[in-house]
Amino acid sequence: MSAEASTPASEPSDFIRDIVAADVVAGRHAKIVTRFPPEPNGYLHIGHAKSICLNFGIAREQNGQCNLRFDDTNPAKEEAEYVDSIITDVRWLISGWADHCLAFKPRGARPLRKSQDGGLDYHIAPTTADSAGAEPFFASDYFEALFDFAIVLIKAGKAYVCDLSPKETDEYRGAPDQPGRESPWRNRSVEENLDLFQRMRAGEFPDGARSLRARIDMSAPNVWLRDPLLYRIRHVPHHQTGNAWCIYPLYDYAHCLSDYIEGITHSLCTLEFVDHRALYDWILENLNLPRTLPHQYEFAKLVPGYTLVSKRKLHQLVSEKIVEGWDDPRLPTLSALRRRGIPASALRRFVIGVGVTRFNSVTDIALFEHAVRDELNGSSERRFAVLKPIRIILTNLSEGESIPCEAVNNPQSENPTRRPVALTREVFIEADDFAEVPPPKYFRLKPGGEVRLKYACIIKLDEIVKDDTGAVRELRCTADLTTRVGGPNADRKVKGTIHWVSSRESFDAEVRLYDRLFTVPEPAREEDFSAVVNPRSLEVATAKLEFSLRDAVAGVPYQFERLGYFTRDSHPASGRLSVFNRTITLKDTWAK
RNA sequence: UGCCUGAUGGUGUAAUGGUAGCACAGGCGACUUUGACUCGCCUAGUCAUGGUUCGAAUCCAUGUCGGGCAGCCA
């Protein structure tokens, strides 16, 4: 199915898109440039998907670009491993939809320095992500530029080197309802600040001994304006810059300038940064920058129910082995969702569908599940698989007999193709499709009752054979071959139609049936979320699959008829059997 | 109790002073060789109280409730 068909019919509209559209109409920007700026300290999850689709969606609608930038200003927490997974996840999510908007830079490129109108300027030009030698943007590529901008602030008397310890800095900051006190180092001379800052860079001081701070207002009601730190000393190697630096810029300083350097027009982030916006603007406005300044807009993050999206807690789930890794299909990480068989198009449809507002909420996962089912229903071929087999003997068929049947691959397609399946004397049906003592309105197989084996014929249950323990060993039935397709009684109606596989033309496979990881809608609110882990979030079964599934490719979705959507696991099977993951069940309105 | 921010059916949202609409979920029914899909119908909402106005979800005031902020994290 084409990617176009899977995107919402009408272009989404929200308060941010309205702002962007107004800016376009006003001619404020030659081109709309957004960015997705993850810190490489963990795996991307469904919450990031919303941000990715917002930023790339706007770029796409405005014929603009969206930069992938790593916000790697804290070497202590970041690892190269995460860089690769993030690139993979972003490319996967936007594939077939906004690939053309993804902007990288030439490998090794650094911002170009210009002095313009007496002001210092740095700018870096993008390149398309698929051009040779392209790589994502890294905030660490701007360390030299950021350092130079800091010098400008110092020279203007707008930044100073502070010798307060971290603890003292904290005390001096005051409280939300009490003004802070000015640092005793706040009024150092420009010359002394310049000297000290250079020596900080040169490595003369230990971690935490000094910092560079903006000189704003220690009594500001907004605590982020109380002389926030711009640089800290960290004698730690960086995954990109190695040992080149021992001072590292903080988020608030690096982010606004990274946006500026890249020519970002609209910097979109989540609501917890609202209070930082004043600082974002202050830094840019105090540098006398020649080009148009970017602006920050905030939106509510996506919090889906029955799962966790906090990085710290996701780390904990992995490290405490509550799940089996970052791509454990029960997790909301993009790699897990992909492994589970969720199409990128369904994820996009979901995150775009929930919209963009400034209202904090918990999104019902039914919204997600509907997007997934709807997407998969149109695109998945159908197959027969029996998860909990029970043996049927068709007593009027002989041992070696094989009755050819044709099964429709996808009834949703305009010109459905078919595949052969064989009806034999011994077949398996789902244990749930038989009831010795049927509940009311049960129209599957019951004593003396009839049911249709889909694409084959109607069978009648004659005899239940049990073993010594009383467990059902097999069901002996008669097949009415006149009800086959093309047969004289093909149109005979019975209420139940069930799936089946031939014992001879099927193989065993491990199926992993996933359920929500937590038993409560908001596990993040629990003091100990490990207490609300769903003990049945993973159920493993050995299923009987029709032969055609033997060469199923990981990532290609199949609907196992009447059961749900499955895909082959992308990890090499550790055991004898191949593994299939259940992406999601079919909707089931039959009350069990 | 400083600053910021928000509140529309069960959930996510739309309506930008002029008929409160959409999707999901739920219920009933039709169709069905998937108890799926599809189709039809139904249930259910503007946080509260005042005010402005011919007219208020929208503007104003007060209140209530919720979220965020005091890392040398992002």
Image (cartoon, coloured by chain):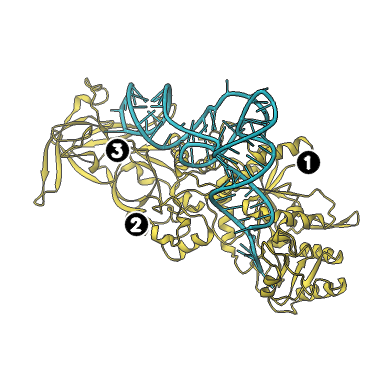
Chain colours: A yellow, B cyan
Q: Which chain carries label 1?
A: A
Disc 3: CA contacts within 10 A as few (<14), some (14-19) or many (>=20)? few
Q: Residue furthest right?
A: A118
Give the residue pinned by disc 3.
Answer: A591
Residue A30: give its label. Answer: 1
Q: Is residue B26 left or right of residue A94?
A: left
Residue drawn at point x = 48 percent, y = 58 percent: A326
Tag 1: residue type? Ala
**Closer to the observer: label 1 or label 2?**
2
**Closer to the observer: label 1 or label 3?**
3
Quick one: A445 or A380, which is closer to the camera?
Answer: A445
Which element carries disc 2, helix, strand or loop?
Answer: loop
* Disc 3/disc 2 C-alpha distance (Å): 22 Å
Which element carries disc 3, helix, strand or loop?
Answer: loop
Q: Earlier in the sequence, mark 3 or mark 2?
A: 2
Q: Earlier in the sequence, mark 1 or mark 3?
A: 1
Tag 2: residue type? Pro
Whether residues under marks 1 and 3 lie with C-beta atoms below 8 angstroms apart, the answer is no
